[in-house]
Amino acid sequence: MSTFNVPALIRRAQQKKKKLGLFLKKLRRQKPKNIQKLIKEADKAAWAEVDCLACANCCKTMTPTFTKAEVRRISERVGMTYDKYFNKYLKIDEDNGDIVNQNTPCQHLGKDNKCKVYDIRPGDCSGFPHHVRGDFFYQVGEKLYENNMPRCPATLKFVENLERIVAEGK
């Protein structure tokens, strides 16, 4: 695993966002039959290049959505009541009604870029950056990957790798 410059990758993602977004849009129209195989290959290659613990940009700049069960589980782990934890760290997103963090970076992100509640983190965190999904084309349409590229170097690498793999005709 090589070291990488997170700010440089974020800049590159912003520069390539439109081009890679067009690639994803074209891929969505073509819908290759072997897309899950291509996605898994691109994802594996991305993780060979990116170390989450060297980055943690998602935890520093984004907030997951929490279910009530996740809030309950995490609040118990940190020794707080549901209400006390909620009032101190969370809020209801006015746009969509989701439970989200009040602030970034995440309250559970340690100085070592490790999550203090990793084993019970929200599903939104454990699934991030959502590369290998059965609803890949829906997420392309919703611009999930396009929007996450400037936030997550692994997503930038994933889409770049997917573009390369598709061009190679695998």
Image (cartoon, rainbow, N blue to C red):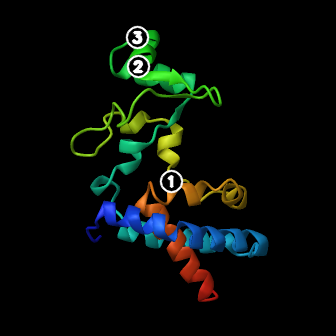
- In x, y percent, where is residue 144? 60, 54
Secondary structure of residue under mark 3 = helix
Give above or below for 37 relative to 168: above
- Residue ID at (57%, 78%): 163
- Image x and y of residue 102, in percent: 44, 26
Q: Which residue, given by chain and number where applicable, does mark 2 sit on? A: 75
Q: Residue at x 53, y 39 (%)?
A: 123
Reading the image, the residue beneath label 3 is 84
Q: Residue at x 44, y 57 (%)?
A: 152
Tell me whether circle 3 and circle 2 mark residues in contact (CB < 8 Å).
yes
Looking at the rendered structure, the kind of residue marked 3 is: Lys
Is 97 situated left or right of 85 in this image?
right
**160 over 167 or under it: above or below:** above
Asked if residue 104 lies left or right of residue 138, the reply is left
- Quarter occupied by residue 48: bottom left
State the quadrant of the N terminus.
Answer: bottom left
Tag 2: amino acid:
Ser
In front of the other: 16 or 68: 16
Label 1: element kind: loop
Point out the tag, 1 or 3, that comes first from the N-terminus.
Answer: 3
Q: Return the x and y of residue 142 as percentages of the image width and height.
A: 68, 53
